[in-house]
Amino acid sequence: AAMELTVSVPKENLKVEEQLQITASSYMSDGSTGMTFQYRSLNDCASVDGNGLVTALASGQAQIEVTAVGAAGNKTKQH
């Protein structure tokens, strides 16, 4: 079954110390659910916690990686 991963980023620009909640959702083509999400910052411009709360740490372009983890495998997107 194919997995679809959608990441919602409500705002593109943050000031240092400003926070933003990103939201991930996914579904399997066979209708199964139960995925969990892992969030990871790929540089020093921002941090992200396990619930997708991003905090701007410095000027620049932050890169956040979101991975949906399910019984049928994983799917990753970067923003």
Image (cartoon, rainbow, N blue to C red):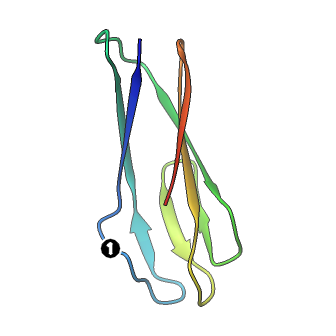
Q: Residues within 10 Å of mark 1 (few under 14, many from 20)?
A: few
Residue 76, picture quadrant: top right
Task: Please determine whether, in this image, residue 78 is positioned above or below residue 11.
Answer: above
Q: Identify which residue is drawn at 59% across, 90% down.
A: 59
Which of 53/2 is in front? Answer: 2
Q: Position of residue 40 (x, y in %)?
A: 63, 53
Q: Position of residue 69 (x, y in %)?
A: 55, 27
Quarter of the image that includes the N terminus: top left
Q: Position of residue 12 (x, y in %)?
A: 37, 76
Which of 7/17 is in front? Answer: 7
Q: Identify which residue is drawn at 56% across, 79% down.
A: 61
Q: Identify which residue is drawn at 46% across, 24% down.
A: 35
Task: Please determine whether, in this image, residue 64 is positioned above or below residue 19.
Answer: above
Q: Amino acid at mark 1?
A: Lys
Q: Identify which residue is drawn at 64% across, 78% down.
A: 45
Q: Position of residue 9 (x, y in %)?
A: 35, 62
Q: Is residue 18 left or right of residue 46?
A: left
Kind of element beneath mark 1? loop
- Location of mark 1 (residue): 11
Residue 43, picture quadrant: bottom right
